[in-house]
């Protein structure tokens, strides 16, 4: 009986040790933990940024323009009337002549071509007096020329003021011819005159600043005058240097 009791106690102790080892064994999960990168549920989409082009309007060159100008003859002379190489009418003038003109141009890059019309009031002729006190004067006239006109701008430098070359050529309608006034031995006489039409031309230089323009032209109105009732006809061209100031109005 004692042996049986001792054997039973030994089996009980062995069973207790085995169970204790199983309790001490570490517990591991049956599932493997995998670390994955966390991503946002919303996808970020980079859309292209569209820049709107800002268009700055550029003023187009004008199709053409109208130029209104006024001029002053600061030097002038007529043809003189000579009889057997003796001057009867002076070619010198007194005071100042003038004109007002209207010109219409078609524009290209540096060249303008147009038509013009002007009213020209030529100045008076000086009285020619001889050593005896006898004198002659008169035979002045006025003109309305119609002409072609051209301007070439010398735009080689970036200047605020643009220089140009200018030329006019056309036909001069001459009218309102003054009488020839004579003083002879203390008596005064008057002889009516008439004037023919003729060629008109002018050429010179000028300057433009924005819509303003200034030019200096040498010009000539060709004419023949006739003394009424007398067989006297003579060249009576009017020559001068004119300073003009104008203002342009663009045509779009």
Image (cartoon, rainbow, N blue to C red):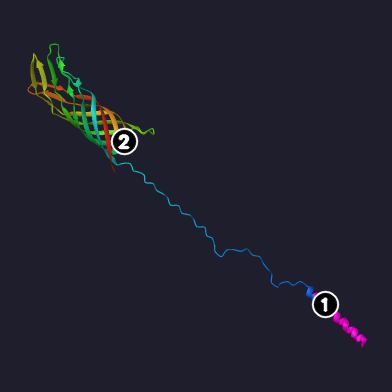
Relative placement, left or right, of 236 versus 17 is left
How many numbered badges does the structure rendering display?
2
Is 161 in front, or is 62?
161
State the extent of the magenta-drawn residues as a range: 1-21
- The numbered disc on residue 111 is 2
Residue 8 falls inside the magenta stretch: yes
**Mark 1, residue position:** 18
Screen quadrant of the C terminus: top left
Relative placement, left or right, of 19 versus 173 is right
Per the image, label 2 sits on a secondary structure element best described as strand
Relative placement, left or right, of 6 versus 50 is right
Q: Residues within 10 Å of mark 2 (few under 14, many from 20)?
A: some
Q: Earlier in the sequence, mark 2 or mark 1?
A: 1
Relative placement, left or right, of 106 versus 135 is right
Residue appearing at x 29%, y 31% in the figure? 214
Determine the main secondary structure of the stretch shown in magenta. helix
Verify CB contact (< 8 Å) between mark 2 and mark 1: no
Among all residues in the image, which is located at the extreme right?
2
- Residue 243: image quadrant is top left
Per the image, label 1 sits on a secondary structure element best described as helix
Where does the image place residue 67, in percent across and percent down from the top left?
Answer: 26, 36
Where does the image place residue 13, in percent across and percent down from the top left?
Answer: 86, 80
Q: Residues within 10 Å of mark 1 (few under 14, many from 20)?
A: few
Residue appearing at x 85%, y 79% in the figure? 14
Where does the image place residue 158, in percent across and percent down from the top left?
Answer: 39, 34
- Please tell me whether residue 208 is drawn above or below residue 127 in the rendered image: below
Where does the image place residue 224, in percent across and percent down from the top left?
Answer: 15, 25
Residue 97 falls inside the magenta stretch: no
Residue appearing at x 89%, y 83% in the figure? 7
- The numbered disc on residue 33 is none
Please indicate, yes or no, whether residue 73 appears anywhere in the rendered image.
yes
Label 2 – label 1 distance at C-alpha: 119 Å
């Amino acid at each position: 009986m004692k042996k049986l009791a001792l054997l039973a106690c030994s089996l009980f102790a062995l069973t207790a040790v085995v169970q204790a080892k199983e309790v001490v064994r570490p517990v591991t999960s049956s599932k493997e933990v995998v670390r994955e990168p966390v991503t946002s549920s919303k996808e970020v989409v980079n859309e292209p940024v569209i820049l709107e082009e800002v268009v700055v309007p550029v003023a187009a060159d004008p199709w053409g323009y109208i130029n209104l100008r006024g001029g002053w003859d600061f030097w002038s002379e007529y043809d003189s009337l000579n009889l057997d190489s003796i001057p009867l009418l002076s070619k010198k003038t007194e005071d100042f002549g003038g004109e007002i003109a209207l010109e219409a141009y078609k524009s290209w890059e540096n060249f303008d071509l147009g038509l013009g019309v002007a009213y020209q009031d030529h100045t008076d002729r000086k009285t020619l007096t001889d050593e005896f006190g006898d004198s002659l004067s008169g035979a002045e006239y006025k003109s309305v020329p119609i002409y072609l006109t051209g301007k070439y701008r010398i735009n080689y430098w970036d200047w605020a003021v643009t220089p140009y070359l200018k030329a006019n050529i056309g036909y001069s309608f001459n009218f309102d011819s003054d009488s020839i006034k004579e003083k002879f031995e203390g008596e005064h006489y008057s002889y009516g005159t008439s004037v023919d039409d003729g060629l008109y031309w002018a050429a010179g230089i000028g300057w433009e600043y924005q819509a303003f323009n200034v030019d200096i032209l040498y010009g000539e109105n060709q004419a023949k005058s006739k003394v009424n009732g007398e067989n006297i006809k003579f060249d009576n061209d009017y020559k001068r240097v004119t300073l003009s100031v104008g203002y342009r109005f663009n045509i779009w």
